Image (tube, rainbow, N blue to C red):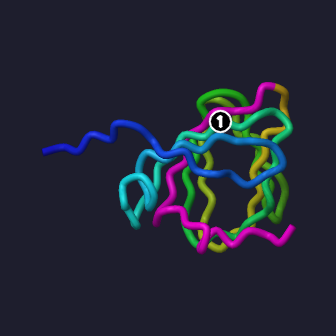
């Protein structure tokens, strides 16, 4: 029988401004270690510390623009586009434009504070 996920769990986000992370599947909300799926809502001007995660992250932007800084430059990912970041690759996410962004993030294996490897602030 399929399992209904009635609601997400709100996860505390890193960064300079409040960002809403709603985990539908993952270590916290569903006990999954192999995948996490979350809806993100970040305000304009939000930026988080850089990171070198041990997981692959697939991100689909639903509204606005997400900026993905990497060691070779910066990608602007707009509504209707997606980006894949790879394990061991340094990245920093932000939403510098007014209005922020809404996006879905899928991490394989699941996101964990122990495997995100954030830069020291």
Magenta residues span 99-121
Q: Is residue 65 left or right of residue 3?
A: right
Instruction: Classify the position of the N terminus by image quarter.
Output: top left
- Outermost residue toward the left in this view: 1
Callout 1 environment at 10 Å: few (<14), some (14 to 19), or many (20+)? some
x%, y% of residue 66? 73, 40
Instruction: Classify the position of the C terminus by image quarter.
Output: bottom right
Q: Is residue 20 left or right of residue 5?
A: right
Q: Which residue is mark 1?
A: 41
x%, y% of residue 3? 23, 45
Residue 102 magenta-highlighted: yes
Q: Nearer the viewer, residue 93 or 7?
A: 7
Residue 98 magenta-highlighted: no
User: Is residue 83 placed above or below 73 in the rendered structure?
Assistant: above
For residue 51, which quarter of the picture? bottom right
State the residue at coordinates (34%, 36%). 6
Image label count: 1
x%, y% of residue 9? 48, 46
User: Is residue 24 placed above or below 32 in the rendered structure?
Assistant: above
User: Is residue 4 placed above or below 72 in the rendered structure?
Assistant: above
For residue 111, which quarter of the picture? bottom right
State the residue at coordinates (84%, 32%). 97
x%, y% of residue 22? 53, 42
State the residue at coordinates (62%, 48%). 83
The secondary structure that most of the magenta stretch takes on is loop
For residue 21, which quarter of the picture? top right
Q: Secondary structure at mark 1?
A: strand
Q: Nearer the viewer, residue 39 or 107?
A: 39
């Amino acid at each position: 029988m399929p399992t209904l996920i009635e609601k997400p769990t709100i996860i505390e986000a890193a960064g300079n401004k409040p960002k809403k992370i709603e985990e539908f599947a993952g270590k916290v909300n569903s006990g999954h270690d192999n995948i996490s799926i979350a809806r993100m809502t970040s305000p304009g001007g939000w930026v988080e510390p850089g990171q070198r995660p041990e997981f692959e992250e697939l991100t689909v932007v639903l509204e606005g623009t997400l900026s993905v800084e990497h060691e070779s430059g910066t990608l602007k990912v707009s509504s209707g586009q997606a980006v894949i970041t790879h394990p061991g690759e340094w990245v920093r996410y932000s939403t510098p434009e007014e209005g922020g962004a809404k996006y879905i993030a899928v991490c394989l294996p699941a996101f964990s504070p122990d495997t995100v490897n954030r830069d020291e602030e």
